[in-house]
Image (spheres, grey):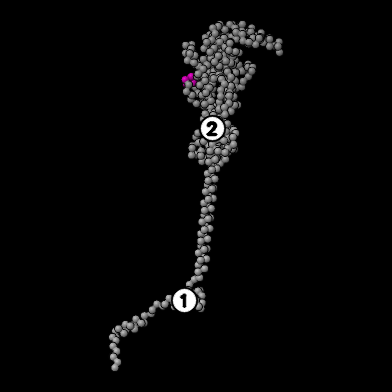
Amino acid sequence: MYPARPVLHPGRYSARREMASVPQPPNRSSRPARQGTPPPRKGTPPSQQGARPANRSSARKGKRTNTGCLTGVLYFLFVVCLSALLAGFGWMSANEVLGLSKPEGQVTVEVPEGATISEITAILQEQELVQWPWLFKLYANVTDAESKIVPGTYTVDTNLDYMAIVSAMKKGSQYRAIVKVVIPEGFTMKDIFARLAENKVCDEASLWATARTHKFSYSFLDDLPIADNRLEGYLFPDTYDFYVGEDPVDVLSKMLSNFNRKLTADMRARAESMGYSIHEIVTIAAMVEREAANAQEAPTIASVIYNRLRSDSFPYLEIDATILYALPEHKDQLTDADLQIDSPYNTRLYPGLPPGPIASPGRSSLVAALDPDETNYYFYAVNKDGVHQFSRTLAEHNKVVEEAKQAAAAGG
């Protein structure tokens, strides 16, 4: 007999059936081929079915490797070129700023009054001292060069660096153009300013404005009224070295300083002992300067002036040089109308000294004014021989004048 089969429990059986009904994941080997992938060839081993070709994968890897190398090379070349450009630019900039390869030579640079740094840079570029204007302006702004450069004319070496170029245009620079100017004795302010302008030291307008309004620190100017000719007689005649385009204050200060040195302490004490101010002494010296034919007769001319100043009989100095000073234009011969000009400088109409000096006296005239001869002369005139002849009386004087006229007529 066969053994009896065991009776399965209904619940277990149901569970098995339920488990059997749950779908199982398909086997990987039974997955359908990807779309676009060709079916495996017959005879292909199962392990190779569905695999990508090895040579195609290797080709793609090689392509990526080649592309990466090319990018790296291009980047390296870019960095090298950029570095070279920056290095070249830096070298050229340094060469420009430091003046390393500039040619040797000299050029004249004129910096006008009130010029801006842009205008100065344009002038420097025109003279080929600067090749890159923007770089010089950058340097000038960083170093505040505009406040250091002073107007004037400079003779500058062409191989200077930026710092030396700016230094060459400073006050007192060795590169500044210098001109020698001779101011003769007896020159008026008008004559002096014209000569300074001719030599390009200063323009006349700035000299006149400075002379009128600038306060110079000299005691002999303290009590003088503000006037165009305030410095008349105090700009000492001499030979001067001036800068071309020099500041008018510096120009006039140099001449005033020279006068201050020439008027020694003994001379000042002598004027005080005589009872005259420095201004009056300079006024007398200026008339002596314009009237005397030479230094030898200057003390005698001075004696005539002092004799008249102390005389009640001859209160008028009657010096024609003062009338010439009052005229708008210089004349070689005065007319009767000129002798009647209404001016305090007309010493034929106004007694005593004129308001101030009529020219710049030299040292010999100043000495004559402080140490005149002791004489009884009240007149002098050019005689028939062309030299001054001094007279005590009007009759003697008129005789000298008449003889001179006859000689001139006979010679003409």
Quadrant of residue 386 within the rendered picture:
top right
Which class describes the residues within 10 Å of circle 1: few (<14), some (14-19), or many (20+)? few
Q: Are marks 1 and 2 in contact (CB under 8 Å)?
A: no
Q: Position of residue 104 (x, y in %)?
A: 59, 34
Direction front: furthest residue: 1
Q: Which residue is mark 1?
A: 46
Which residue occupies 49% across, 71% down? Answer: 52
Q: How many marks?
A: 2
User: What amino acid is at disc 1?
Assistant: Pro
Mark 1 or 2: the one toward you: 1
Which residue occupies 47% across, 23% down? Answer: 217
Range covered by the magenta-colored residues: 219-223
- Most common SS among magenta residues: helix
Q: Is 96 colored magenta in this rendering?
A: no
- Does label 1 or label 2 sit earlier along the sequence? 1
Q: Position of residue 344 (x, y in %)?
A: 55, 18
**C-alpha separation, residue under disc 1 versus residue under disc 2:** 95 Å
Quadrant of residue 151 within the rendered picture:
top right
Q: Is residue 109 above or below residue 57?
A: above
Nearest the eye: 68 or 58: 58
Q: Check the picture and name the quadrant holding the C terminus.
A: top right
In the rendered structure, find residue 168 and report the number of the disc placed on it.
2
